[in-house]
Amino acid sequence: MKKIFVFIACLSLLAGSGCRKFIDINQDPNNPEDVQESLILAPVEVAISQDINGGTAAFIIQMYLQNAGMAQEAPNTDSYLLQNTKLDGSWSGVYVMVLNNLKNLIAKAETSGKTNYVAIGKILSAFTLGTATDLWGDIPYTEALTGLEKLRPAYDSQENVYKTIQTLLDEGITGIEQNGTVKPGDDDFFYGGDMSKWKKLAYTLKARYYLHLTKAPGYSGETQAGLALQSLEQGMESNDDDLKLAASGAAGQESPWFLNFQPQYALVLASTFIDNLKNRNDPRLPVMAKPAENSGLYRGRVIGTDIEDPGNFSFPGEFYAGTGATNFLVSYSEALFIKAEATLITEGYAAAEPVYQEAVRSHMDKLGIAGAEVDDYLSSRGTLTAGNALQLIIEEKAVSNFLNFETFTDWRRTGFPELTIVANAVTDAIPRRLIYPESEKINNPQPQQSAKLTDKLWWDN
């Protein structure tokens, strides 16, 4: 995988290149101007897993969700102290490492008639745009990725970005249904060229982004829930359909969450996360977390309190943060929780109950939890009622989506899991978005960049 990381840097230079080739003798054979689709796809998938779903923005969000905290003196990132410069790499990951190279992949595949590569490029573009807009709100897209044509691209409204996401997913599905003869193989780290899984992913993403808009201005919750349910009819069908990437575990090729939770970085699990699992007697606790090294007990950091030795706190277990752990981007469990919430909206809590239980079981199964333990746990949680249904669905979805961005969106949409502002916070409320990076403010100043961490996004109504 080291070769892939080196090559993706070359792709980034290619994506941003606007230079003409004047004399062939000056062409650098080590910096190609054209590459095959297969050589673009693999490193882009790695970048999505490592830089977007496991990079700086990802672990900042885990602190805002109080899944993780800094065993350092407050104020710190976990108490909402954030500099714009800290997000430069995350923004670059979205635009330079991923979207630019996906644009090149799509253009080349369209020219060569490789519809399956076009489809994958559009589905991954939709996923990346969805992640970015749910972090920053309005973002550049229509005028972006054009090289020197638009040095200061205007921002698309978040509503228009959402419409673009659905269009890209529809076009991706159409590309797959054209039954192109050329499809990826080993260069597709996510699905190994299984286009049926890519199609199910696209429909699951459509459901995800429909459901996000149940409370958006001008949108009907029941309509959005109905669209989500309709999409899920062709969505993921089992845990085998998860969009995920496992690290090799070799030196320099560790999983991103193993790297994020290194003791020298003092990032540990937070008390909110650990205590919730302990208080519910959740059988997933020993799989999802390790006992603190110094005490042998499961203990989370109370964010904002006095500095302590990281060894006093729990770290994630091997399943999520081992050297060769799998990074889960979109899962079948999420699809089931989407279905449970959408069913709750359209048909009520009784109809949502079996879907909710199936969703919990799918995550338990993934973690290797035995059937009797699952039954006991579900019994202890109680059945869905008019008063608790949404809370239980989203709380359990948060556990199954551990270390995933999606929980941040769910918390903002629903208020669950319930969170309270941490000690020694530098803001008067829990952040509801990310601020724009310094590099973007300097290179492409836009009015939206005055946004504060506590400002709401368009759909966060």
Image (cartoon, rainbow, N blue to C red):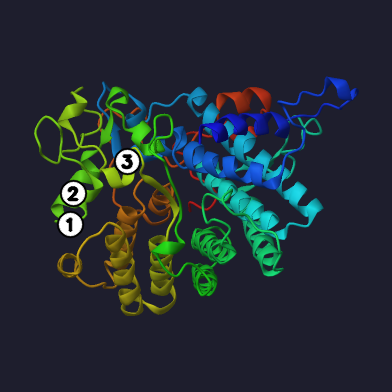
> Which mark, by number, is residue 321?
3
Q: CA distance from mark 3 to mark 2?
A: 13 Å
Question: Which numbered disc, 1 or 3, marks the residue closer to the eye?
Answer: 3
Q: Give coordinates of residue 75: x percent, y percent.
A: 31, 23
Residue 283 numbered tag: 1
Secondary-structure class at tag 2 = helix
Label 1, label 2: how many angstroms apart (C-alpha)? 7 Å
Counting from the top left corner in percent of width and height, residue 98 is at: 61, 40
**Pointer 1 local density, CA inside 10 Å: few below 14, some 14–19, many at least 20:** some
Whether residue 430 appears in this view of the structure is no
Indicate the secondary structure of the residue bearing disc 3: helix
* Foreground residue among 188 and 98: 188
The amino acid type of the residue labelled 1 equals Pro
Seen at 50% across and 71% down, the residue is 232
* CA neighbours of label 3 inside 10 A, class few (<14), some (14 to 19), many (20+): many
Q: Residue at (39%, 38%) from the top-left corner? A: 255
Task: Residue at the far right: name it.
Answer: 22
- Check if mark 3's residue and mark 2's residue have beta carbons within 8 Å: no
Left or right: 84, with 353 as reference point:
right
Left or right of 83: which side holds 64?
left
Earlier sequence position, callout 1 versus callout 3? 1
Amino acid type of the residue tagged 2 in the rendering: Pro
